[in-house]
Image (cartoon, helix red, strand yellow):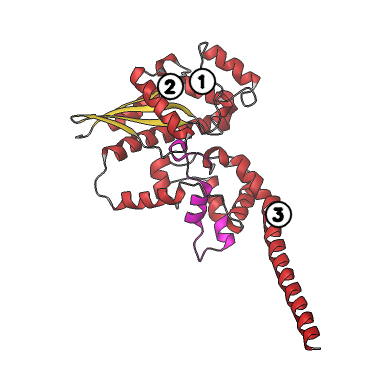
Amino acid sequence: MKYLLFTLFFVFFMSCKESNKATTLNTQESSAELAMQHPGKELMETNCYSCHNPNTKQGGRIAPPMIAVKEHYKKDSTTKEEFIQDIIAWTKKPSVEISKMPGAVRRFGVMPYLPYPEKDIAAIADYMFTHDIDEPEWFEDHRKQEHKREDSPQQSVEEIGLSYAIATKQILGKNLMGAIQKKGTLGALEFCNIQAYPLTDSMATVHNAKIKRVSDKPRNLSNKANAQELEYIESFKTAVANNSDIKPIIKEEGSTVNFYYPITTNAMCLQCHGSEKEVSPETYKALKNLYPADKALGYAENEVRGIWSIQFNSED
């Protein structure tokens, strides 16, 4: 009789345990399914990931990843309604005054106005608040480095070079995004053809430096890399292909600093630099008209398209 009672208790216990395990798994699966079904997920990936994609390499970014946005806007005391309204307010009228991400604004500039419907912005914000957001592999290390830089009173030549490259990239990226919003991909081509050089030169003047973008597969022959720069491009390609940490190449001659850092592709770049499946026939035709000797096609995401070649005086 005791053996029978023990057997019945054991069977009951194991059944409960398996039931609880199944319930936990079902709950996890349900949460994942709900996240996949949430309309804000697709809207975020479609509308935000051209700039905020978590898979974009750190050096190729023109905006912070969405996890960084969430962390700055969602605090312990923040309600979902407050979070949604803050995201809507920022997206509808971006400005330095209302930004909750001063570091990102200093690095990337103020995001251009994007005419998305308010209901879409609200859906994206709702998804961000209630679900986990993908975090780039480098994000935690980057966060620690940012804190170190904030505590450091003096910049190294590496930090100075990076700041020049990033500031120029964000100016070009912001204007490029504005051109795409107004005129589509052809507007981006028009911007690059007419304004990219003057904007880069203006940033060089601001920083009292020589700032160039050069490539082994130039679109404009003025961007053709020299022999030394070609070696550095190959070095960066190897590092990116091996998922190695990307460090700038720095050559110093007295107070003159020559700084090199890779320019990598993201999803937005592929509209004009991708393969036939990303570059529309209309865009391809316009490219051939503007750049008959164009070599800057056939790229995939996270590939080295060229490098920043920057020269400055460390004593300035």
Residue 172 visible in the snapshot:
no
Quadrant of the snapshot with the N terminus: bottom right
The magenta-colored residue range is 55-84
Residue type (three-letter) at the residue carrying disc 2: Ser
Q: Does 253 sit left or right of 87 as displayed?
A: left
Along the polypeptide, which appears first: circle 3 or circle 2? 3
Q: Secondary structure at mark 3?
A: helix
**Callout 3 environment at 10 Å: few (<14), some (14 to 19), or many (20+)?**
few
Q: Secondary structure at mark 1?
A: loop
Residue corresponding to mark 3: 33
**Callout 1 environment at 10 Å: few (<14), some (14 to 19), or many (20+)?**
some
Note whether 186 is above or below 108 in the view shown. Answer: above
Answer whether labels 1 and 2 touch (C-beta < 8 Å).
Answer: yes
Residue type (three-letter) at the residue carrying disc 1: Ala
Which is nearer the eye, 309 or 1? 1
Note whether 196 is above or below 10 in the view shown. Answer: above
Q: How much space separates mark 3 and mark 2, taking CA atoms?
A: 44 Å
Residue corresponding to mark 1: 296
